[in-house]
Image: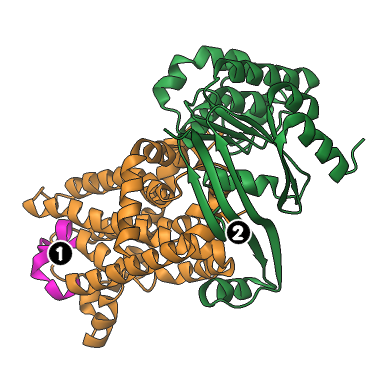
Chain colours: A green, B orange
Amino acid sequence: MSNKVVELKNINKEYYIYKNNFGRILGILFGKKPSETIYALKNVSLTIEKGERVYVFGKINSGVSTLQKIMAGIVYPTSGKVITNGEINCYFGKAAGFDNEMTCMDNMYMRANVIGVPKEVIKEHEEEIVEFAEIENYKNIALKQALKGTPARLGLAVHLLKDTDIYLMDENFSQGAVESKQKCEARFNEYIEAHPETTFIISVLGIPWAKKHCDRGIVLYKGEIVFDGPIEEAVQEYKEKYNKA
Amino acid sequence: MIQALINIIKTNIKHRDQMWEMAKNHQKKQYRGSDMVLLWAFAKPVMYIFVFFFAISIGFKSSTNVEGIITPYFVWLSIGLISFFYMRDMILNGANSLKKYGVLVARTKFPMEILPTSVATSYMFIHLGMLAIGIVLALLFRTPPSIYWLQIPFYMLLMYIMAIFWSLATGIISVIYRDFYNFLQVANQAVFWLSAILFDVNRLGPRGQTAFLFNPITYIVEGYRNAICRHVWFWEEPVKLGCFLLMLFVMIFVALLMYRKLRKRLPDVIV
């Protein structure tokens, strides 16, 4: 039986810029030419197998975010084929599903609902989430009034309750104090260790983290894969490509 | 086109719990930070009813003459307004249903097909509460319960289906073409006066009545009134029902067309 969990074949993704709203609707409905075309991904093909830990390297506008969203099934490619096999969990937006005006507890349940974690599961782990998110004293207070970094901690704690085969992450834990970031990273690392069967495709936690936890690296440059192989070599390639010391 | 419809229905069935929670949260969000959510949700429509009642029955007394009703004018007015309020809320909130939750469509693996349903369901909670108030008013004004009241769920279902497909069609258009929402905001001001809420459509001339046949809002408002105030079955007015269904099918067709053609482009442009 094949162990492939993600397979991308000749993926191209173009974003079209129109001068105004009217131009955009004419473009979408009747094929009017855009004033500018952004080529986010160019002929990307790759295969990821079950249990692999993959780090995707690239800077802003290199196509990392688009690539992950296409794998997650959020964004659709302009051409090419996407095949995924298994339940997908993606952590792309700290704020997605949160409402700053609502209480921390309401937000906990709303976020869970958005990503498809059943209410019963959240109820069962409520204490654990509250403790991790450090909202014991802020349960019924608006999220905006809680400690800095609460959305990141709360979001992660809820996210990690979702059973998944493929985990994609394009969002770091940098919000709030350094301790909060370290706490989130430690919790995420624990999760990775405890789920050897899950495939992780990460793009945000930095080179040291990637070297420690990933075995494969993909380097994207201007929408193209310029390297795909062992993590050490990927780091080298990334540094060279982006002139990083 | 049928495939698009099947896909929408399947997604809504599969994610029904998610849809239901979204619907509840949508209302909570409207009045977030407020202690008396329920009070504020109903205060505005109730106030409207009383203001219209006083303005019409005292200010323009002649307009209060409605033929064939077995209830006082006040009940006739309230029942019409209650069904209208739901549709009025849905015109703008339905059109905003995708844009409002754009971050979910663009940044999470979220079934966008449930958004129009959840917004339509969310306002249904308020509608059911308002309908209960309307029925109590009817009973207080000596309107005995009748078998004709059984048609209310029929009209409610038509209104709900219309709200869902309206939200889907206009929700997608509003994302792709931002000016459309501004247009709806302006048009929404006129809908009230173009839907025969305050006056009896049956008192208009033949041309006026024909024009109103193609306003689905008028059909629903009249339907509620026929059930409670006039005691007319829906099958007794087949032409009106036929015209309404025609308009509903057009709306569903446009919604499915938009969905099929633009669904994959939404995450690119929604935020």
Rendering coords of residue A108 (x, y %): 53, 26
Instruction: Say whether residue B235 is magenta.
Output: yes
Q: Residues within 10 Å of mark 1 (few under 14, many from 20)?
A: some
- Return the disc, 2 or 1, that comes first in the chain's sequence: 1
Q: What amino acid is at disc 2?
A: Val
- Is disc 2 placed on a helix, strand or loop? helix
The reply to whether label 2 and label 1 mark residues of one chain is yes
Residue drawn at x 24%, y 47% as measured from the top left: B137
* Residue behind mark 1: B69
Decide which of A104, A76 is in the foreground and name it. A76
Residue B25: x, y in percent? 46, 37
How many labels were placed on the picture? 2
Amino acid type of the residue that numbered disc 1 sits on in the rendered structure: Ile
Residue A135 visible in the displayed image: no
Mark in the foreground, 2 or 1: 2
Find residue A11 and report its image quarter.
bottom right
Q: Return the chain for callout 1.
A: B
B72 relative to A42 in the view: left or right:
left
Q: Is residue A216 above or below residue B168?
A: above
Which residue shows up at 53% across the image and 48% down it? B105
Q: Magenta residues, as a range?
A: B225-240
Which residue: 41% across, 36% down? B21
Label 2 packing within 10 angstroms: few (<14), some (14-19), many (20+):
some
Q: Which residue is mark 2?
A: B269
- How far across and down, in percent of the image, does residue B206 sit? 21, 86
Examine the residues drawn in magenta and state their main secondary structure.
helix
Is any part of residue B100 visible from this angle?
Answer: yes
Is residue A104 shown above or below A220? above
Check if residue B29 falls in the magenta segment: no
Q: Position of residue A54 (x, y in %)?
A: 65, 33
Q: Assign the N terminus of chain B to one quadrant of the image.
A: bottom left
